[in-house]
Image (cartoon, grey):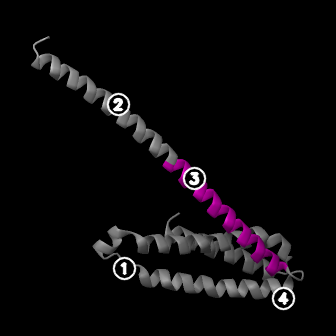
């Protein structure tokens, strides 16, 4: 997801949460929106990290959006602190702590899944490389025999 789309998703989820809490809705009904907000925050952090690590943007001087990204991260940080205080004030005891624990477990699961996908990708690349090298070896052997036959005037 692009950085601006992630910021928009986070702001939309935050607006829903804020409106529901102001209207007196229960916090338990807002868990999905809180999840969307916090997921968008993680995605934004990852997108900014990937952008900074991108060698092409460092060559081309791609720092034009740095201030906006910094402001968006700071805004999300303030909104997260506000969500924490709302959950602690209006939610059942321990809601925020359980959410933090759940979020940590979900991050670990996402990292494990990403490592598994990376491992599978590397295995697939290795298999494809082996197959391509095999075809090249067969082709080179055939070409060598053909050249040898032409050189010895057998063909």
Residue 135 badge = 2
- How far is disc 2 from disc 1 in space, using C-alphas? 45 Å
Give how far apart the Cα atoms at labels 1 and 4 are. 40 Å
Cα distance, mark 4 to mark 2? 67 Å
Q: Is residue 16 above or below residue 135?
A: below
Q: Is residue 35 magenta?
A: no
Q: Which residue is mark 1?
A: 63
The image quarter in which residue 106 lies: bottom right
Separation of marks 3 and 1 at Cα, in angstroms:
31 Å
Give the image quarter of residue 13: bottom right
* Residue located at (22% from left, 21% from top): 145
Report x, y in % for residue 87. Answer: 80, 83
Whether label 2 touches label 3, CB < 8 Å: no
Please state the horizontal and vertical placement of residue 39, each as a whole percent of the image: 65, 70
The residue drawn where x is 89% and y is 83% is 93
Determine contact: label 4, label 2, CB under 8 Å.
Answer: no
Q: Which residue is mark 3?
A: 117
The residue at 26%/23% (across/down) is 142
- The local secondary structure at tag 4 comes to helix
């Amino acid at each position: 997801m692009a950085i601006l789309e992630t910021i928009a998703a986070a702001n939309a989820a935050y607006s829903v949460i804020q409106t529901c809490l102001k209207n007196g809705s229960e916090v338990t009904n807002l868990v999905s929106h809180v999840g969307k907000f916090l997921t968008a925050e993680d995605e934004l952090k990852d997108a900014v990290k990937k952008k900074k690590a991108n060698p092409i943007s460092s060559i081309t001087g791609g720092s034009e959006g740095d201030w906006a990204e910094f402001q968006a991260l700071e805004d999300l940080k303030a909104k997260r602190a506000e969500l924490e205080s709302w959950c602690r004030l209006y939610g059942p005891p321990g809601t925020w702590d359980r959410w933090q624990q759940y979020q940590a477990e979900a991050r670990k699961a996402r990292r494990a899944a990403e490592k598994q996908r990376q491992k599978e990708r590397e295995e697939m690349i290795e298999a494809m490389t082996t197959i391509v090298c095999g075809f090249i070896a067969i082709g080179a052997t055939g070409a060598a025999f053909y050249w040898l036959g032409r050189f010895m005037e057998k063909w």
